[in-house]
Amino acid sequence: MIIGTITVEAVLYNAQSLKEKRSVIKSIVTRAKQYNVSIIESNHQDVWQRTEWTIVSVGSLRTQAEKELKRALSIIETNSDLEVTNITWEWY
């Protein structure tokens, strides 16, 4: 069994309140969950213009888990409301 995790840090330049930030985050989380991943906002919950997600996928093969993680990551990276500043991959 392989467990893959990605930590994604991003900046939301246009968010002027936590409500606006939550709207963007909820949209991304909902879309990412269509893949075989779990995703949470793991840091910066009370900051308007920063966020950090942790995305996890479990599979019998590393290629399976990596494929699902890349799909979820592409949803975040293609979102025009934010800019990804750091991505960290880990395997267990």
Image (cartoon, helix red, strand yellow):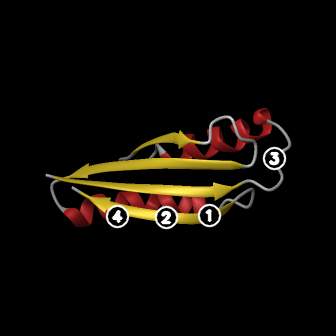
| Label 1 environment density (alpha carbons within 10 Å; few <14, some 14–19, many ≥20) | some
- Residue at 63% across, 57% down: 10
- Residue at 50% across, 41% down: 42
Residue 27 lies in quadrant: top right
* Disc number for residue 87: 2
Do callouts 2 and 4 mark residues in contact (Cβ within 8 Å)?
no
Q: Nearer the viewer, residue 64 or 55?
A: 55
Q: Which residue is mark 1?
A: 84
Do callouts 3 and 1 mark residues in contact (Cβ within 8 Å)?
no
Residue 68 in sight from this viewpoint? yes
The CA span between labels 2 and 4 is 16 Å
| Label 2 environment density (alpha carbons within 10 Å; few <14, some 14–19, many ≥20) | some
Q: Looking at the image, is mark 1 or mark 4 nearer the viewer?
A: 1
* Disc number for residue 68: none
Q: Say whether disc 2 or disc 4 marks the residue closer to the N-terminus.
A: 4
Q: Which residue is mark 4?
A: 67
Residue 43 versus residue 19 in the image, above or below: below
- Residue at 13% across, 52% down: 1
Residue 26 lies in quadrant: top right
